[in-house]
Amino acid sequence: MKRHLLRALLLALLLWPTALHSQGPFQGEGDPQGNLLPHPASAPSYRPGQILVKFRTQTPPQDQVEALGALNLPVLEVLPDLLLHRVAVPEGQEQMVIQALSEDPRVEYAELDYIVHATIIPNDTYFHLQWATLKIQAPAAWDQTTGASDLIIAIVDTGVDLNHPDLNGKIVPGWDFVNDDDSAQDDHGHGTHVAGIAAAETNNGQGVAGVSWGARIMPIKVLDRNGDGYYSDVAQGVSYACNHGAQIINLSLGGDTPSNTLKDALEQAYQDGCLIVAAAGNSGRNEIDYPARYPEAMAVTATDQYDELATFSDHGPEAEVAAPGVDIYSTLWTRPNNHDYGYKTGTSMSAPHVAGLAALLWSVCPQLTNTEVRSVIESTATDLGSAGWDPYYGHGRIDAEKAIEYAGPPPTLTVSTHQMLFLADATWGQWPQTLIVGNDAPCRSLEWSAGDDAAWLDEIPHTGRASCSQPGKVVISVDTSGLSIGNTYYATVTVASSTLGVQESPQEIGIKFVYSNTPLLRTFFPLTSAD
């Protein structure tokens, strides 16, 4: 017990004085600042400066007090129902304290108090009817972003119900090319339904949820009360939308024949940076409608609740992605002053799911080009049908969660240090050190793995994920079993990533372990007078 307490007291002396990280005989052996323990570059994924400790049930209260007091760990809170102590530790030293407590036979476990995140489920009245939103993993994407309000989705359609309570707070000025005025009021219902799918007012206690909560809606009326219109009006609508600030143009409409006028409008809008999303068509043919058939448009086919291609969905070599299009619940206009909700089916309903996802992507990564947004949506789609691209599902059914995770430039793997020094003697074992695995890409996460070339080294965990806001952490420790006192050992820890496109992988960390035949107690103890 005396040896146990002496070790605990020594650890406490090593933990709390800050001077030990900037002074002493080992400065320069670790990173360039002389830190034996690397410090995180960004916010940790756990509560800093605190840990949770649970003692074994047979441990008397006085022994619990003794164990924590020996390490100079103030008790912040006792959680009697869980038999837990929440204690304070020096920030950056959490893993060291956990390791020391784990070696105490009176302690059942000690661990970090990790951060947990809520999966956002909106409170809209009819959200439970929106199976498609769940199918494309939108709630998981909403944990990262619900969409920026500076993004505009143009609904080039029959107009939008300008007074619908689930839309009217998000509408920006548009144009009516059918009646040639500035009031793009829907008099058919189709455009209102499309607009709600993409970007209905969300989490407002009524109606439905849009894929992008924040994006605003630009109503462009090019179809009349019967749902018919002319290519010339559609072309003007596309040009108007792009020239008046819309980044995303949704075209839930189509025709059988090509048009140079329409093609020119799409080409110019795409060159100007707009993303164009278009419905594939509803005739069940192996032939996609125009304008979806043009290369500037993302042609979207329709799937059902079981990820099967909808029987009505057109398909063909231009198919880019698929999205839900059967029994989609959204906002409706049925007659003047009647603001309603209901189901519609068609590739017209599939396209705005993609438009809303594009708005989410641009919200987290505004530096992306329209081509890059398009590529992310394709690359992260859930493959359906034949392996790889096929003419029915394109690259697959869209997945909002994966798209948000993948967005942005390729991630770069980083580590907090490329050198680590471990010390031990016959009496005192070494203390583990924490390596921070970083990723400087603002919009993408990476998967990493850690390994070594020495039997006496260990890494916990061996795998993980790192993002710009939540780096990974690896606790590296030395097993002295079988090693000879008086020797110095060298090894290499390698951290690598299998994530597609990751840069600067692998990273190598040089490990030096000094197994001293001189008691470290005499080396370290004078340092305690630095404070």
Image (spheres, rainbow, N blue to C red):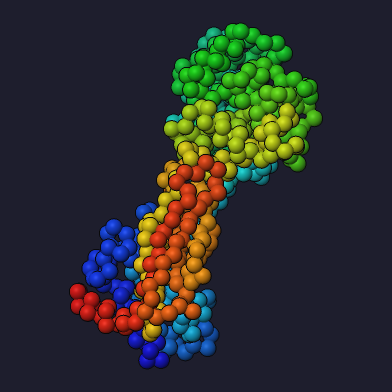
Percent x, y of residue 218 = 52, 23
Q: Residue at x 52, y 36 (%)?
A: 360
Q: Residue furthest left?
A: 530
Relative image position of residue 254 (x, y in whole percent):
68, 17
Query: Going by the image, does 226 lie left or right of 439?
Result: right
Task: Please tell me whether residue 508 is drawn above or below residue 501 in the rendered image.
Answer: below
Along the line of sight, the residue nearer the viewer: 522 or 375 = 522
Considering every residue shown, the one lying at the far bottom of the view is 2
The residue lying toward the viewer, choosing from 243 and 414, is: 414
As rendered, which of 485 and 168 lies closer to the eye?
485
Q: Quadrant of the C terminus?
A: bottom left
**Where residue 81 sits: x, y (%)?**
53, 76
Residue 264 to residue 284: above or below: above
Q: Residue 528 at what x, y percent from top left?
A: 23, 77
Residue 461 appears in the figure: yes
For the N terminus, the image quarter is: bottom left
Residue 54 visible in this rendered orientation of the protein: no
Q: In this view, does 379 lie to the left or right of 64?
A: right
Determine which quarter of the picture holds residue 203: top right
Q: Which residue is drawn at 66% across and 19% down?
A: 293
- The residue lying at 44 percent from left, 65 percent from top is 491
User: Residue 50 vs residue 459: left or right?
Assistant: left
